[in-house]
Amino acid sequence: MRLRPAPPIPSPNIWNWPEVYEQENRAQDAEGALWAALRDAVPWRGLDVLDVGCGDGFHLPVFAAEASSVVGVEPYAPLVERARRRVGDSSITDRVRVLEAGAAALPLLDASIDLVHARTAYFFGKGCEPGLAEAERVLRPGGAIAIIDLDATQPPYGDWMRADIPHYDPVRAERFFTDRGFSLLRVPTVWCFPDRATCEAVLRIEFSPATADRALAATPGVTIPVGYRMHVRRKP
């Protein structure tokens, strides 16, 4: 008998405020540093790409502009519908699929993917072992898993993260991946918002009221330095 998949872990920011999170996505990585680092590590032109935890599909068109095919996997049904609408109204429709599923039960064939990308999906490290095993299963030999997460060791954003999640140990999370053969690259970039109101709205869906107040007081303008960490492992 096949076990029923575990319910998805809620992501309160995008689940509850998808329109604000859209503005957050647009503000993130204003310098393109993350995309440049990922492209250097795993060029995806002409490859088959899987975006795990794709949310409402914000990153799918970026991959589809160069990839042979793109699959977005997302466990939360309302976000799946938003992602399908995003890619359904564009010229990339024939190269992109969005599937409702979790990382621990990917509805894909063995050895069918060249790049598995997961952004801000494996934040804690420990606990994502089933997802990593599934990523390894669907990868072709020579393919790569690329995990991008916020770097809580880097101020100021990392300080605010740790203030709201005092039990989170970012060094332990990093070690989880390096112990499993992943590389580690720190990528500094910036978030740049169109106006102060958008900046405030985003910070208030990411942090508790007290921490959001602290972040806003420390951010006089509309730009915030934010660090990321990128872990990459290739399948032999």
Image (cartoon, rainbow, N blue to C red):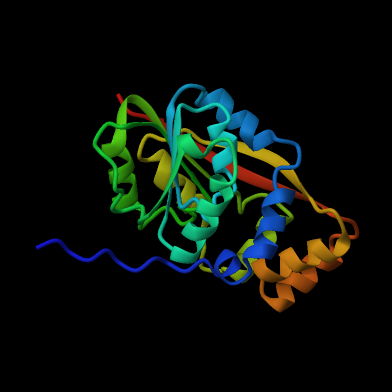
Seen from the viewer's position, the closer of residues 176 and 231 is 231
- Position of residue 126 measured from the top left corner of the image (x, y, whole percent): 38, 55
Q: Is residue 62 above or below residue 45?
A: below
| Residue at the spot 47% in from the left edge and 33% down from the top edge | 183
| Residue at the spot 66% in from the left edge and 56% down from the top edge | 158
Q: Is residue 36 above or below residue 11?
A: above
Quadrant, the N terminus: bottom left
Residue 56 visible here: no
- Position of residue 88 measured from the top left corner of the image (x, y, whole percent): 54, 47
- Position of residue 168 measured from the top left corner of the image (x, y, whole percent): 52, 63
Quadrant, the C terminus: top left
Left or right? Give the position of 224 relative to 167.
right
Residue at the extreme left: 1
Total number of numbered labels? 0
- Position of residue 95 measured from the top left corner of the image (x, y, whole percent): 47, 34
| Residue at the spot 85% in from the left edge and 60% down from the top edge | 219
| Residue at the spot 69% in from the left edge and 64% down from the top edge | 20
Left or right? Give the position of 234 relative to 44.
left
Seen from the viewer's position, the closer of residues 108 and 92 is 92
Residue at the extreme bottom: 209
When asked about the image quadrant of residue 19, the answer is bottom right
Left or right? Give the position of 199 relative to 82.
right
Residue 70 visible here: yes
